[in-house]
Amino acid sequence: MFLVASGVIGFYLTTGTSTSSLFNGGVFGTFVIILGLLHRQGRMWTQPASLSAIAIFLLTFTWRASVQWYAVSEGNSERVGISILLTLMSIVSAAVFAVLFRQYRH
């Protein structure tokens, strides 16, 4: 649900110009929700799949946040909101990754 909400917030922070944030938040948020539901049904393959997906999200959000913060440091103050959102998304992804990694049993 966090990814879906982040997509909506990102859409509004970009004044409605980033439809990809809605699409990506909705698609990938739904993907993670489905993985969680399948994991609750006992499908063991979902745990490494979830761990991999969250790792990719963590790397992507960290990279995108770095790019946005660099733009802010260059004087583009209109990107502060999206920079904060991407940083928050990185932090949440890192926390979820840590929890999934600790629970991972192979």
Image (cartoon, helix red, strand yellow):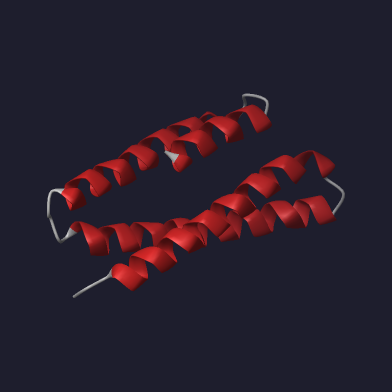
Percent coordinates x, y for residue 6 in the rendering: 53, 38
Q: Residue at x 50, y 34 (%)?
A: 5
Between 75 and 30, the one lying in front of the other is 30
Residue at the limit of the structure toward the top, as seen here: 16
43 relative position to 85: left or right: left
Q: Residue at x 48, y 62 (%)?
A: 95
- How many marks on residues? 0
User: Residue 49 sits in which quadrant?
Assistant: bottom left
- Establish if 49 lies above or below 22: below
Q: Which residue is drawn at 12% across and 54% down?
A: 42
Percent coordinates x, y for residue 105 in the rendering: 22, 73
Between 57 and 74, the one lying in front of the other is 57
Q: Residue at x 62, y 27 (%)?
A: 17
Percent coordinates x, y for residue 76 in the rendering: 82, 45
41 relative position to 47: left or right: left
8 relative position to 76: left or right: left
Residue at the limit of the structure toward the left, as seen here: 42
- Establish if 96 lies above or below 2: below
Quadrant (top left/top right/bottom left/bottom right) for the N terminus: top left
90 relative position to 96: left or right: right
Percent coordinates x, y for residue 58 in the rendering: 49, 60
Residue at the limit of the structure toward the bottom, as seen here: 106
Quadrant (top left/top right/bottom left/bottom right) for the C terminus: bottom left
Between 61 and 36, the one lying in front of the other is 36
